[in-house]
Structures are given as C-alpha cells and as structure tokens.
Image (cartoon, rainbow, N blue to C red):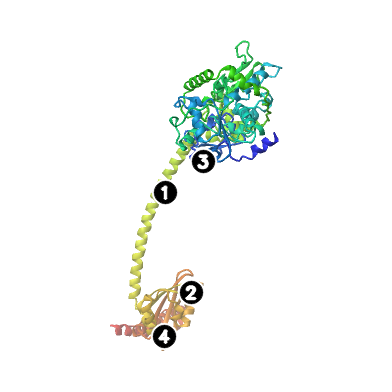
Amino acid sequence: MKDQQIRKQSNPDPVIRVEPSECKLCYACVRECPVKAIEVKANVDHVRIIPERCIACGSCYTACPTHAIRIRSHLEKVKGYLESEEATMAIIDPSISGEFPDITDYRNFVGMIRTLGFDGVYDLSFGVELAAGQHVEIMSNFKGKYRISSKCPAVIAFIEKYYPQHTENLIPVLTPAGVTAKIIHSLHPNGCRIVLVNPCLASHLDIETLPEDSTIDAVINFNELRELFKYKKLNESMVEFSEFDPPAGRTGTLFPLTRGFLGPAGLDENLISGRCLSTDGRQNMLEAMDEFASSYDIRKHLDLFYCEGCIMGPGMSAGGHKFRRNTLVTEYARKRSQLYGEEDWEKALAPYKNLAIERTFKPDNQVLPIPDEAEIKDILNLIGKSGDDRIDRGCMACGYKSCREFAIAVAQGLAKTEMCHLYGTKNRQEYIRSLRSANEQLAKTQKALQESEKQTREEKEMAHEFSETLAAVIQKIPSGVIIVNDQHRIIQANRTFIDLFGDEIAAINEVIPGLKGADIRSLVPAPMSTLITFTLQNDQEVTHRDIRFDDRIFNISVFPVKKNSIVGIIVRDLSSPEVQREEVIKRVTEVIDKNLEMVQKIGFLLGEGASETERMLNSIIEYYHSGEK
C-alpha cells in the first residue's frame, strides 16, 4: 500500500477539472455532484473542482452545458505506446457492444483494435467472472458482517472518502480491470504496457491504487477510442475477423448491466431468500449507502453501481438510450455464449481459480465538520430564511437538497450566498433599484454638467473677447504698459513701452513679437526692476516714482494684478510735452489740495492770504489748459 500511495501522489493531473474561461456559473455541476467536491468562491467567476474530494464519477462532466469540464486524457500517451517497440495490450470493457452498434460483429471490432497497433486484445469479462466468484463466496459465507461490492471504482472512492467507517465493509477484491491486468502480467512475464478501454472516469483513480502485479498504464474512454480509429483512418470493412486473446469470459459480458455482476456468478438474488440488494444510478446509490450507514433494518449485502450500469458511464457517447444499449449488451452476451461453450470456459477458468486477487482499502476521510449552529443561523438570516420552517427543504436551484445544507456549505467554504436563487433575485432587485437611482442622478449630473459647460464656454468666449479688447485698449494707451509674471517674464507690452526704451528693445520686439516671455530685468533700469520685484513679493502698489534713464526721467507706477503672481507697470516719459503739462497740472492740483487742507486747519490765521494763493495757482492751471487748446 505504501507504493500505491506514492504513485497516487505523484500524479499532479486531476481526473476532472474546470476550464475557467468556459465556465458560466450555471451551477449545473454543483447540482449533480454527489459529494459537493465543487467549490464556488465569492468574486471568482468560475467553479473549481477540489481533487481530494472528487470521486471522479463524471456527473459534472455530463451535466455541464458549456463543456467547461475537462477530463484527464491518456490518449497521447497511448499513441506513444502504439508507436513504440514496447508490447502493448488492451483490455476491452463489454459495454463496448452498447457503444458501437454500427460494428455488426464484435470480431471486426477486435480486428480494428489490433490494427491500431495493440499486441494483445483481452476481454474484461473474464476478470469480471473471477472477481464475481470471490464476491459470491464471501457474501454466501456470511459471518455477521454485511458487505458492499467492490466492482465500481466510483463507489469505492465514495465510501473511502465519505463513509470511511464502512471501508472495511467493502469486499477486499480487485476490480475486474485489476484482475484482468494481473492475468495479463502473468501471461507476459517480460513486461508489457496495459491500456484499459472503458467508459468509467473513476478507473483513473482505480489504476493509481492497484498492486504492482496488476498495474494498468493508461485508461481511454470510448470517445477517445473513436478518435484513435479516426486518427488511423480505420473502419470495419478494412479489417478481418479476430478473436479476443484467451482467456475469454462468457457471463461476464453482462457486467455493464444492473444485476449483471453477481447473478450470473450464482448469487441468490431472490427477493425473499436472497441476502443482497442490487441497485444502480447516482440517487439510488446515495440513498442505499445513507440507509446502510444509518439503519440496522437493512440486513442485506449491497451490490452498487454509481452509474445506471457501465452502459451509461460518462465515457460513453452522449445521448445514448439506456434500454437500447441494454438490449445490445444482452444480444452480445448471447452470441458470446453460443460461440464459447461452458466446457471451454471451465477449462480456461481452471488455471486461475486460486489466483490471489485480494486487496485492501484505505479510508480517506473527506467529511467536513458541521459548523456551529449559530453560524448556520446567521447565514440563513442573511439569505432571508430566518424562521422559515422549510429550511430542511428547498428549491435546490443552488445544487443543495435544502436551505440548511446550503447554509452549511457556505460556512464550510464550498458555496457562496449568491448561489441562492431567492437571495440573488432580491439582491438583483435592490441592485436594479440602486442602479436606476444612480442613472437618474447621473442624468441630472450630466444635465448640470452640460449647463456648466455651456456657461463656462460663454464665459471663456467673453473672457477671450475681453482679453482682445483689453489688449487693443492697452495698445492705444499713450503711456508704456507692461504685464509681468512672478518669473519677471513679460506677458504683454504695448508699443509705447517698446518705443520709450529705444532701438535695442525694438530690435528684440522684431524677434519676439510683443516681447512675450522676455525677462523684464534685462530690458529696464535696475531701480524699475527693483520696484517690480517689491510689488510681486509684497503685493503693495507703488505709484509715481521718478526714475532717470539716460537723459530722460520716467514716472513709474507698479500695481498688483494677481497676488504675488502678476503685476502691471505704467511708464510715462516726463520729458514729453504732453506729460509735462499733465504732470504740472497734477502736481499743482496736489498743492491746492494740500493747501486747502491746511486752510481748513489754519484759515483763521491766514484769512484772505489763502484765497489769494488759490487764485494764483488756478490761474496757472488755466494757463496750461489754454495752452493745450
């Protein structure tokens, strides 16, 4: 068993897996999985099969409507065997007769198998008969322990994982495939490869635990066998008849059918006197094991198939009809019985009557602990099932038999609450309402945004228009005007400023129109640059400062436009006659204002003297005004 366990762990490829990109989260696989080996996680858009919990029954594979379930394939490995020099033998399951009704004679079929390159073609039914004989002997020699047949790999895996306490009830005999492989190895002591051809996915698990003298190297199903025929371009008309290699079976050909295993081997299955219950099919098998484990009233041995017989296994072609296949198998068994007499069969059986085909089974407990009742109730409350007396039933849309089982699975991490149809519908309705509200709010926001964009566009147009107007006005102002940023770069300058500072600045203007971007500090006297820096840093206006430049005197005013960022400068040439006249008037006016203020304070002292002074100054102003005219 130690070697078997090492082989089992060394295979990283799961028998069944999910292709994430093709999974639509329909939960069809969850509903069909008998052991809930499929987990559904929140925020994950596909299911995942948990390999250690999977019994490889194939129910999810046949149920998946999008073909997202993938199964382990040994097809390429088998092609390699057939193209090598190694001796390669095939074991053929008798359910083949229900899969290939188009092949009219099984001997043609055997011939096609040999033509593929197999060195030997063996009939599984002989191994069936040896295994069935051991079963009958153990069941008939009843010593108080009721037994369970060990013919079906899916049933074996199910009991080892989910009824580990009943592992010892399994009859300790190799599966028919293991028995047949042991016979083949005894016939080929120099070694050979063995390929099992059957419709059972769980055989992949079975071959991982076979003893060293019963090893099977690969398993292919009937769909893969069809691919091999297509690959080799083979059909029935291209080959001659060929028989199975001996030893061949007779009644073992009924193995794929319900009651086709023990009855033909001589077990009493009479409803009154018999000690064995035979059943097949997923639901029947589950119920039989549940009742066997929980009730002392079932005082019977169990003969179980997971599928409805091998003829309905997951490796058969999809869409097959059970009773038609049943008929084809029984017809095949009848032909074999006619061709292979009982005397010949007894003679073939004799050398193997004492063949050691015993084996042991090892519990692999995968039963998850039941969560706390409080946690279960919390989940039931979350999905809206609090106080519901129907929690032990349910719609089963989630894949679980009851709301309670579903809540347990959620707590165990196998399921998510969104799988509940009613909970999902409620959430969708709430989501739709919130989405509708969000859409309405979005529509309002979009309308407000459009209005805001319109207003911004209009304001931008107005600002642009104003900017153009302002620029035109600045150009018409007789004084020099400059707008400067906090980097002392000129944003805008009028023509008067350029003309005031001579030919050098005019030349720069030819290269940089409007002096935009030029450093003001390199163009004006240092005192003027100092005033600009002061206003930028202190955000204070500086007015009417006289600065000498060459042989002229400029009157400078600097004022903030944008705090610490943009300033405006007005430059007037005091040597200009117009400016001189204006400046004299301005300054005389200032003298008058100051004198008037003084008059108010000391008028009683000056009396008529102040009035006389005002008349004299006014006459000067009038004189200059008359000069302008």
Q: Residue furthest right?
A: 143
**173 lies left or right of 396:** right
Q: Is residue 479 visible?
A: no
Where disc 3 sits, the SS reads helix
In space, the residues marked 2 and 1 are separated at their CA atoms by 43 Å
> Mark 1 or mark 3, which is nearer to you?
3
In space, the residues marked 3 and 2 are separated at their CA atoms by 69 Å
**Given the image, on which type of amino acid does mark 4 rest?**
Ile
In space, the residues marked 4 and 3 are separated at their CA atoms by 86 Å
Q: Is residue 59 above or below residue 496?
A: above
For disc 1, the neighbor class at 10 Å (few under 14, some 14 to 19, many from 20) is few
For disc 2, the neighbor class at 10 Å (few under 14, some 14 to 19, many from 20) is many
Q: Which residue is mark 2?
A: 535
**What number is the disc on residue 553?**
4
**Given the image, on which type of amino acid does mark 3 rest?**
Pro
**What number is the disc on residue 445?**
1
Lower sequence index among marks 1 and 3: 3
Where disc 1 sits, the SS reads helix
**Given the image, on which type of amino acid does mark 2 rest?**
Thr
Lower sequence index among marks 3 and 2: 3
Comparing 255 with 286, the one in front is 255
